[in-house]
Amino acid sequence: MLWSLIKIVLFVAAVAALALGAVELLESEGGIQLTLMGSEYTFGPLQSVIGVIVLVFAVWLFLKLMSLLIATWHFLNGDETALSRYFDRNRERKGYDALAEGLMALASGEGKVAMAKAAKADKLLNKPQLTNLLTAQAAEMAGDRRKAEETYKKLVASDATRFVGVRGILKQKLADGDTDTALKLAEKAFALKPKHEETQDLLLNLQAQKEDWAGARATLSAKLKHGSLPRDVHKRRDAVLALSEARDILSDESSIETQEKAIEANRLSPDLIPAAVMAARSYIKQGKPKLATRLLKKAWETQTHPDLAAAFAEIEPNETPSQRIKRFTVLTKAVPADPETKMLLAELNIANEDFPEARRALGDLAETDPTARSVTLMAAIERGEGAADAVVRGWLARALTVSRGPQWICDNCQHIHVVWGPICENCNSFDTLSWKRPPMSEVAMPGGAQMLPLIVGAVEDKTSDSAAEVVEDVEIVAEDVQTEVAKPA
């Protein structure tokens, strides 16, 4: 409506400007005086302007007629396509103009205008490989999914545009969540253009989601072959896929070949913690504790992690707490200053009921670098040494507000995972999980800081029901953390 009003206003303004110009020309003096064969012709200003316009039009018409006459002359002299070329040039010019206008409309977000221009260009040019692509993209922008899919299917029918058509339908299926069809289309697109990096990534992610680890490794090798993946990244991701292939390593039906895949994954990427854990458990299953010990020690020196300690405990599951402390010196002396080492040693001494030694092992970690785990360990030490309930509860209350410590976090979407996996369960990205600390966030508590005295027992018997519930929540958190840290024991 507004655009129509603007066009009307512009039209009226143009007519008014022409009328004013004509009046000015009529009222002005002078003009053009032409002498031809002894006769003089005088034209006023308005007549002169009209004459110039007529002359320009006459020249344009003369050139057009000359072009037509030349084409006719060639036709009469045996060139059967001369006239058709003459008229086709005009059609092509109009067709390419429509195509250009359609592309501009598409870039401007005007889907319906782009579709109309594409239809006009299709009639004039008869080049579906150009106009169909514009039509499909314009239809998607306009929300006409059926028209877009029909057009992409037309593109698939031509050898020159088959890849574009397959890729367009592939993206539609991904948007619809039809990953089974999308996988087949991605395989087809990859076969058509194996060097296309976006198609390689799509196929790899879909194969990983479907747990087609062998196919994913083949795609990964193709990425390396065509230069779209650095060698070190390929080595790491190949290890992730090899590890995923061997995930049934601890099942009763696992074969020697499957166990070897876990060991291969660790060989490909020794810093991949789940691979080290699985390879160690494979050695334990094969009755090779020395190899498992050597592997876990090397992995621990690269990056400390609770899962490595848990796997190390499985080497000798029936040992006493004191025996375990002695055997764990292989790990605890490797990187003694690491927070994970300190907490591990504290856990082992708590299991051995040697609470003073557990305090010495933990040091000032709960003060200088507090996490839910280290603070809860302090609560356990205080409890073991007979401290008052208020002191223990104070440590447990603090566990609610400090960092939870390192966790498996997706580098792409920052989603936190309980256990490692090759695919992020939130954004489906491949090999994006890292062991790191999440951003610190505030913990909402009823009544804010005023509730803390109730938690630690500063208020006498006037503790309300809501405070008791908070204390219960704290103790539940402590139990969860204690369950996690007690794994090695």
Image (cartoon, grey):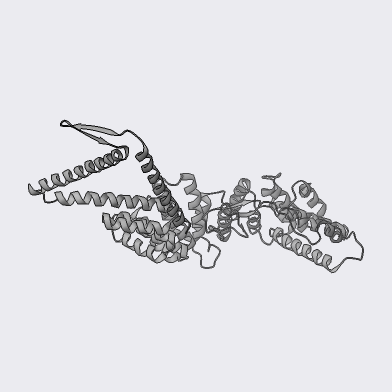
Left or right of 100? Residue 376 is: right
Q: Please name the residue shown 21% across and 45% down the image.
A: 61
The part of the image, by quadrant, that contains residue 139 is bottom left
The part of the image, by quadrant, that contains residue 60 is top left
371 or 363, which is in the foreground?
A: 371
Residue 478 point in image, percent of width and height: 76, 61
Q: Please name the residue shown 36% across and 36% down the image.
A: 28
- Asked if residue 404 is positioned above or below residue 32 in the image, the reply reads below
Residue 171 is at least partly visible in this image:
no
Residue 116 point in image, percent of width and height: 36, 59
**Image quarter hosting the C terminus:** bottom right
Left or right of 398? Residue 241 is: left
Left or right of 436? Residue 15 is: left
Q: Please name the residue shown 79% across and 62% down the image.
A: 446
Left or right of 118? Residue 259 is: right
Residue 292 is at least partly visible in this image:
yes
353 or 304, which is in the foreground?
A: 304
Residue 286 point in image, percent of width and height: 55, 60
Residue 414 point in image, percent of width and height: 60, 54
